[in-house]
Each structure stands twice: as structure tokens, then as C-alpha cells.
Image (spheres, grey):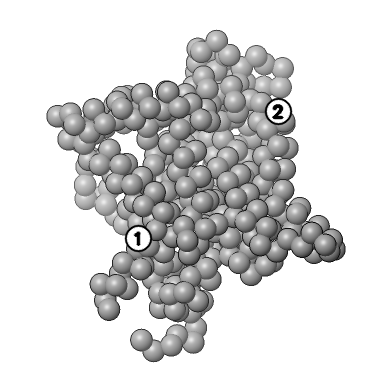
Amino acid sequence: MMKNNHPTLTLVLIWMAWVIVLLAYQAIVPMRLSLQRPDNVLDWTANETLEHSQDNKLYLKGPTMNAQVSWDSEFYLSIATVGYDDPAVRAILPDFAWYLPHFCVAGRDSPCYSLNYAFLPGYPYVTRIVSIPLRVLPLTPIGASTLAGVMVSVLGTLGAMLALYDLTKDELGEAGGLRTAFYLIIFPAGFFLAQVYTEGLFVGSAFGCLAFLRRKQWIAAGLLAMLATWTRVVGIALVIPLAIAWLTELDRKHVDRAMVIRTLAVAAPLAAYGVWRLSPWGQAFTIVEHIFFSREPFVLQRSLDAWGAAWQSFLSDNPQARVYYAVEFAATILGVAACLWTLRSHPGLALFGLAVIVLSLTSGVAQGMHRYVLAVPSIFIVLERIASGLMA
């Protein structure tokens, strides 16, 4: 293949085409297709997919880019537009009961905890910053936040594509690096990268950290590791590739400014997690995640039970559940296999990916793996290796 003199421009053009096609697809399809309600794929989805299920969720009813919001988007938009203690969002009491806002209103002096606290501040606060100049447009505050959220997601995805290219171009060549980045956006769950969800910003900051680390630009790597950790808790796993790189450059006989910077970069995701965890945000997060969303780190027995029930759903006569869990299991197996395949050639990337998978699998709930593995860079490297082998 002829050498590409403008690989960055090529990536940007691929990214722009992807954004246009995906957003157009989401706008056009509802005009021609009516879904059959409800969706019985999981035990909670039936009640959430009825015609009027979103009527009490202010942030999911806006006219601006409504195809890009659903489920957790409500909370990201609420935090970005109003803040964590938004009375328009459902809240819980710490006794396992949850209520609509007029029964339990979250606030500084309230015993209630807004469901917003189950979500870290990185993505919604970056969205809030981006929304500020958009307020001059004829949009509602929620509309400005929605547009900003999509912009943050797709720009984060562009950053992830550039990082994947930079991480792989030496091994796979320019064409291989471009294809590796392309596989990220055409992955079956790649559409999450253009929604009001954390995936775009997280992969952008996490993969960006890994790319800067490869270039030995430790300050940038450390800052992006902090942003990734404040976006999703699994960002703390970036300490693994940072520590591996630190050990390879360790010189016990010579301590200088560069070594101090490297050490601070390694500690960055741990520090980011510690600061957040000790803050009121982090303390409320633990309560809301446990009580309402049933998630906790490393709950092995509950996770085994949940995945056992998922397997039974996969074997059931519910076709929706069979397809859903087929994707979940396939994504997980692919992620683990890809990490093991790249363990020798890219140990830092592979171990980071494995940590993301393990943390996600053992959180107590059997769902979401198809989008969680978007943060596993080994998957896209292996897909390119397979494609290159087939084309050889």
C-alpha cells in the first residue's frame, strides 16, 4: 500500500464521516421504524421501555438530539445543567427506598441522596464547560448540555482514534494503524461513543494516556490518567501501564527531576481516585451505587450468581435475552483473548485491558460488558492483526 503522507487528516476524515453517518442514521431510522414495546431483554427493561416510561424524566424528553440520550444520560445532563443535588432527579433514602422528587428532594441538608451521585464528575463537568459558549444558541439549557455532551463524546473518540494509531503504527504500519483506529468506531457497541455517555471521553483520555506514555511524555500521561479516573472508576487501572513504564526507566542510583515527574505520573490515577473517594461525591457514590444500582467492587459471589443467571437467560426461550447475552459473552471472551494475545508485545495495554474486564465482571451486575470492552485497546490491535493475516 502506498505510504500515506497525511495519516492524521485521514483519521479526521474517517471520524467526521462516522459522526455524520451515525447521527443521521439515528435521526432517520425512527422516522421509518416503530419498535415493538416493551423490551423484555432484562428484568428491569420492560418497565423502562413503555411508551410513557420517560415521562417523569425531564432530561430525556428534550427536542435537541433526543436520539443521543437515554438511560444514564439523564444523570449526566442533570449534573452538567444543574449539579448533583438536582431536585428534578430521583433520590433515595439510605434505607433502600427510592422516591420521586416531590417525596424525597436531595439537597445539602437533606437525608436523601440524588441518583446523580452514582456518576463521577469528569464527563458531566467537562460537558458543562463545553456548554457555556453554546448557550448563545437558541437552545434550552438542557439542549445546550445535550449538544455539548455529544461534542465531548465524539471529540473524545477522535482522541482515542489518534492514540490508537500512534500506539500501533510502528508495529502495524500506517495502514494498519489507521485500520486499528477504524475498528474502534465500527465495533458493535461503537455507537455509545457518540451518545451522552462516558465512553467517548473515557477511551479518549485512557488511550491518550497510553499514547503519551509510549512517547515518554509523563506529565500529559498523568493528567489524562486523572481525567480518565474522574470519568470512570476503572480509570484507576491505568496505574498498571504507568507503573510498568516507570519500572523500565527506574535508575536507583540516580534520582533527578525526571524521575520525580515519572513517579508523580504513576501516582496520578491513585491520587485522583483517593481525592474523589474521600470527597462528599465519593462517599455518596458508594451509598447510591450499592442501594439503587446494586454495584460494588469485587463482589465475587454476587457476581458469580449474576453471571450464572445471565447464562440461564442465554439458554432460555426469550430470544431478546439470548441475543443480548450472546453479545455480552462474546465481547467478554474477545476482550480476554485479545489481552492474552497481546500480553507479550504490549504488556501495559494488555494488563490494563484485563483489569478493566475484571473490575467490570465483578461489580455484581451482569450487563454492559459489550460497551465496557471499548476501553480494551488490545481488541482493536488483535482485530487488525487478524485482518492483516487474512489480506496477506
Q: Amino acid at mark 2?
A: Pro
In-front residue for pair 266/285:
266
The structure residue drawn at horizontal position 52% and vertical position 22%, both measured from the top left corner, is 290
Q: Which residue is mark 2?
A: 280
In the rendered view, does 66 fall on the left or right side of 129? left
The residue most toward the top is: 95
Up the image or down, 325 lies above or below 387; here it is above
The structure residue drawn at horizontal position 49% and vertical position 87%, both measured from the top left corner, is 5
Quarter of the image containing the N terminus? bottom left
In-front residue for pair 378/140:
378
Q: Amino acid at mark 1?
A: Ile
The structure residue drawn at horizontal position 32% and vertical position 41%, both measured from the top left corner, is 328
Separation (CA) of disc 1 from disc 2? 38 Å
Element assignment for label 1: helix
In-front residue for pair 107/342:
342
Q: Residues within 10 Å of mark 1 (few under 14, many from 20)?
A: few
In-front residue for pair 31/305:
305
